Image (cartoon, rainbow, N blue to C red):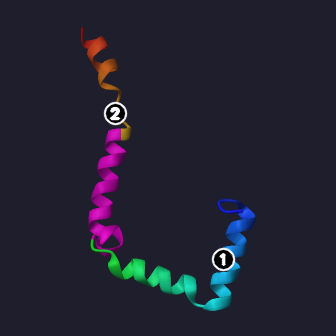
Amino acid sequence: MAGTIAGGKKAAAKNLAKDPNFYAKIGAKGGKNGRTGGFAANPDLARIAGAKGGRISRRRKASDVASKAA
């Protein structure tokens, strides 16, 4: 039953039976191990990155530009 939905539910129930805070503890460990910071730590960086992505996504493809210039 390993790898099935039913098996996953059974494993989750067993983990919660042993420790009701099992998944909260795992999540806390993962959050404490993070070293990158990310956009949540620096909203200005997120704004700049979003602006760059927006500009790039609105450009024409390089191949379109080259074919029309020739």
Q: Under tag 1, what secondary structure?
A: helix
Q: Which residues are magenta?
A: 36-56
Residue picked out by circle 1: 12
Q: Is residue 70 magenta?
A: no
> Could you tell me which residue is drawn at 33 percent across and 67 percent down?
39
Query: Which secondary structure dominates the residues rendered in magenta?
Result: helix
Q: Amino acid at mark 2?
A: Arg
> Could you tell me which residue is drawn at 49 percent across and 86 percent down?
25
In the rendered view, would you say 15 is above or below 6? below
Residue picked out by circle 2: 59
Q: Under tag 2, what secondary structure?
A: loop
Sequence order check, earlier mark of 2 and 1: 1
Residue 55 in the image: state x and y as whole percent.
Answer: 32, 43
- Which of the two residues, 16 or 60, is positioned nearer the viewer here? 16
Which quarter of the rendering shows the C terminus? Answer: top left
Q: Quadrant of residue 31?
A: bottom left
Q: Residue furthest left?
A: 70
> Could you tell me which residue is drawn at 29 percent across and 72 percent down?
37
Q: Amino acid at mark 1?
A: Ala
> Could you tell me which residue is drawn at 56 percent across and 82 percent down?
23
Report crowding for label 2: few under 14, some 14 to 19, many 20 or more residues within 10 A (C-alpha).
few
- Which of the two residues, 13 or 56, is positioned nearer the viewer here? 13
Q: Quadrant of residue 36?
A: bottom left
Q: In 3D space, how far apart are the residues under numbered discs 2 and 1 (Cα atoms)? A: 47 Å
Residue 69 in the image: state x and y as whole percent.
Answer: 25, 13
